[in-house]
Amino acid sequence: MLLPRWQRGPVAAIYAFARTADDIADEGNASEAERLQQLDAMGEALRAIERGEPPAQAVYVALADTIERHALPTALFHDLLSAFRQDVSCKRYADFGELMHYCRRSANPVGRLLLHLNRQASEPNLARSDAICSALQLINFLQDIGQDYAENGRIYLPQDEMQRFAVSEDAIRERRNSFEMKELVRFQIRRASKLLAAGSPLGMQLRGRFGLELRAIILGGARVLEKLHAQDDVFARPRLDGRERLGILFSALRQGFARH
């Protein structure tokens, strides 16, 4: 609703591509080999678009038109596919560096694509966008600790930090709300909060409805972090109710006026 009308078609095309790949990686009963084969086929479709020969499927026709009209870097779509392939085969992350390398391909391309779409892809803007998108990806992991493990056998908490805080995989499987588990999660919350704050000036720099949307996203992420920190059950997924969403929107508007 916050997007300018001219952006809605291109954003829908980008979303359709990413959603299709995400569903291949996560949904259904296909084997790992079948999932990887389908993601490879999407990579071939991207290369066909690069050759000016988009496949006839609607998702690729729309994506090819969006890429051509707005000069979007196709490497960013290949990065997304790389992350989805990793989701199929990689279930653990040794340290935070490995996790951030995943975020660089799973989350950051989306922010970069939107900056390119808005002709705002300067190096400082891209760096701040990366911080925001990585923070949002980390927040998503913290909301879904139990769900990621139960549904896909994945743990996005760095293994070395689990060891440091004396948290085992059994604790996640059994959903133990121990002191150690809470301290580990709060450590992750503080780091995600710092990342989000590092990128937040971008919301004040960008004008119009795109800037408004970004400020609302940043404020929403910050609010979720507050709720994660306050809740007693680290495996519960905090949700923003209608009143909170409205408050976030008004705050984003107020920040925009204060900038002037």
Image (tube, grey):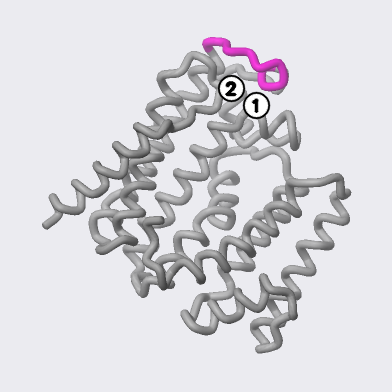
245 relative position to 55: left or right: left
Q: Quadrant of the image for the C terminus?
A: bottom left
Between 4 and 150, the residue placed more toward the observer is 4
65 relative position to 84: left or right: left
Between 52 and 240, the residue placed more toward the observer is 240
Please tell me whether residue 60 belongs to the stretch shown in magenta: no
Measuring from the top left, give residue 147's x and y in whole percent: 66, 30
Which residue is drawn at the image coordinates 38% and 40% (left, top)? 220
Q: Range of the magenta residues?
A: 171-179
Which residue is drawn at the image coordinates 32% and 63% (left, top)? 124
User: Which structural element holds mark 1?
Assistant: helix
User: Which structural element holds mark 2?
Assistant: loop
Amino acid marked by disc 2? Phe
Q: Where 253 falls versus 94 (above or below)?
A: below
Which residue is drawn at the image coordinates 51% and 25% (left, top)? 185
Q: Residues within 10 Å of mark 2 (few under 14, many from 20)?
A: many
Which residue is drawn at the image coordinates 65% and 26% (left, top)? 146
Measuring from the top left, give residue 62's x and y in whole percent: 61, 75
The disc at residue 146 is 1
Measuring from the top left, give residue 237's x and y in whole percent: 54, 27
In the rendered picture of this protein, how many numbered marks are placed on residues? 2
Q: Where 79 falls versus 75 (above or below)?
A: above
Q: Which residue is mark 2?
A: 235
Between 226 and 7, the residue placed more toward the observer is 7
Res 203 → quadrant: bottom left
How far is disc 2 from disc 1 in space, using C-alphas? Answer: 6 Å
Q: Where 77 falls versus 85 (above or below)?
A: below
Amino acid marked by disc 1? Gly
Q: Is disc 2 in contact with disc 1, using a CB cutoff of under 8 Å?
A: yes
